[in-house]
Image (spheres, rainbow, N blue to C red):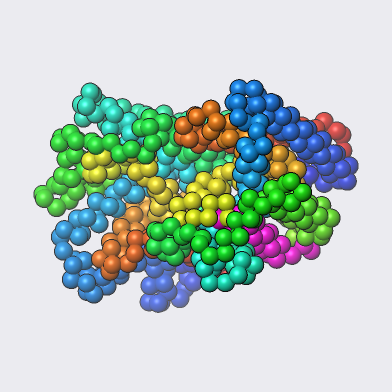
Amino acid sequence: MDLSEAANRKINGQPSYTIFVLSFLTRYYIQSLLVISVVILAAVNPYFGTVGNLQNILLQASFAGIGAAGMTLLIVSGAFDLSVAGLLGLCGVLISEFLPSLGVVLTVVTALVFGVLLGLLNGLVVTKLRIPAFIATLGMMNIYLALAFIWTQGSRVIAVSDPNFNTLGTGALFGFLPIPFLVMIATYLVCYGVLNRSVYGRCLRAVGSSEIAARTAGLPVDLIRILAFAIVGGCTALAGVFLSAELSSASAIMATGYELTVIAVVVIGGTSLKGGEGTLFGSFAGALFFAVISSALNILNVAAYWQYVVTGVFLISALGVQALRSYILVE
Amino acid sequence: MNHSAESPNFRSIFSLSNATRFVQIAESLGVFALLMIVVIGASIIAPGFFTYTNLTNTLIAASITAVTGLGMTFAIAMGGFDLSVGSVQVLTAIVVADLLSAIDPPLAILGALLTGLAVGLVNGVLISKLRLPAFVVTFGMMSIVRGVALLITQGQSVMITKHVEFGLLNNGKILGLPVPFIIMTMVFLALSVLLKHSPFGRHACAIGGNRAAATVSGINIDRTTIAVFGLVGVTAAISGVMLSSQLMIVDATLGTGFELQAITVSVLGGTSLSGGHGNLVGTVFAALLLATIASALNILKVISFYQYLALGVLLIFALAIDTGRRAFIAKSLAARPG
């Protein structure tokens, strides 16, 4: 049940402007936050509003955003994947190794298939060995990282210098909209269709709200979760394609901390960690919000290390806001 | 979901505790047997393993992991987790190294321990008072604390130049035993008393076993949660101090993946993720096992990346065993008529 709808019902009969604003803000708080922060930053700093910077924000948002789309579906089903940083690194290394011999299209397809397979493996470990998702995927992350290290004999950076491939990361439509951002929009549209307009999406939400009820109703709970892990694997590999294209290089540690950013994006977007409900629109705005904040920190010359602190604080406070919101509505 | 909740009579709870105790003893023996096999195997295939120097080094490495593993065992027994221990370890290692340039070692160590305690208490307050899931809070905290460590050092290394006697914490010997091992033993004894023979430990296990029942029986869940996470913070800080005295030069990139080691030794040692009981002896054995494997791989000149791989595989293996263990307990509970 949507919380803001509940709030509206609760105060039915006394429609007032402030209540409307409040319920709008609780429902679309991340979108509001995004707009407010962009307006303030553009007013305060002349560089922030330039085309180059905005373009860069869209580009940076798409790396975390594409991964967050899949992660939203997985979190709706009541699970997590902390292995995405290792998975992305491994896919990046695969791209750098295969690109010279396979060509762009085949390499991208191989990377995506590989990501989906690794996601399936995560899903199998979590569901068939019955290990709590976050700790199982923490172990898998170590394994993927180790494999990527072994493949590259260390944290060696491998150049990815196929001009056609690099266009994927650096190209832009109409000279303004970066290709990764367009792909991010497409990813969100597809995931939106899957989550809200498909039988599988209903199954995801059912499994997330109550695993026992879903099992009793005869849903193949394990299969549904495994597929969700595969989707995360695919999305992460997709993000890996664009990240390695943009960086023109790949290494095992190219995505350190990616899992934290992606989960923070999903949570700050308003998807509940309890599972059962999720908002892709929120995750989309969350990804943009994180890119805006990170760009602001850069422009204001704040030490890069603050990024760690800020991400962690945002993750915890977003959880706090969720808890507070449901607490207020219950009261 | 707790099985004693399904048939809440005395006998079923009694047989549950018997089954867990049996599993626990079997686990400790199993890990110990595995440790012996690995030690013997390593002595044969890796010449240079069974030397005094190498054994001492292995023991020191194991002790550093075990101290945090023991704290983690407490958290897992309570049904919680702490993913921030790696960052706390590095932060406290840096704090003690920084403080040593200004004040005496005992005060510097105290400062580091208080830092760890503070982070742990913040974790505990967020988890209990705001009712946030432990692993996400500590996950966020992992990033925050790492960021603070980087900000303090500005990405540089900190070398301990004053009070070099601080190194005795690592290479000193008492009765021929390395000091880190003595520290680990003391932490082990203290936590064993706390876990088995104090209301605090029983409350922690009760919360892990059946949270609703613990609430109903009047246990102050918030206070116990905060105290347990504070305890984990302190053990991580002790590990941090030990690490600092081992390396004498520290930087903010240390300790990545340490949380994984701490969780692995707890679970491998026989503490179930379902909560309710902690196996401290098993944790120590598992830490020794991990350190022995690492040392053997080092001597055999296996590239260090394979050690990551081994750690990940070992964790998944330990967790799979835990799944079997939980199934066994559930089965032996169901087999006895209530």
Left or right, A131 with respect to A60, comes to right
* Residue B228 colored in magenta in the image: yes
Identify the residue at image location x=31%, y=27%: A110
Task: Decide if residue A298 is on the left or right side of residue B298.
Answer: left
Q: Which of these two is toward me, A279 or B116?
A: B116
Q: Is residue B177 above or below residue B32?
A: below
Residue at 28 percent across and 63 percent down: it is A298
Along the viewing direction, whichever of A146 and A20 lies nearer the viewer: A146
Quadrant where the image shows the C terminus of chain B: top right
Residue A44 position within the rendered picture, expressed as x and y whole percent measured from the top left: 23, 75
Q: Residue at x 77, y 49 (%)?
A: B175
At a point 53% along the width and 27% down the height, the residue shown is B300
**Residue B17 found in image quarter:** top right
Name the dominant secondary structure of the magenta segment.
helix
The one of A33 and B34 positioned closer to us in this rendering: B34
Residue A114 visible (yes or no): yes
Question: Where is residue A130 drawn, in percent x and y?
Answer: 60, 35
Give the magenta part as a residue range. Answer: B218-244
The image quarter containing residue B125 is bottom right
Q: Quadrant of residue B264?
A: top right
Considering every residue shown, the one lying at the far right of the view is B11
Q: Residue A76, percent across and down?
A: 47, 46
Q: Tell me: residue B154, above or below residue A192.
A: below
Q: In which quadrant of the rendered image does the N terminus of chain B lie?
A: top right
Does residue A126 appear to the left or right of A33 in the view shown? right
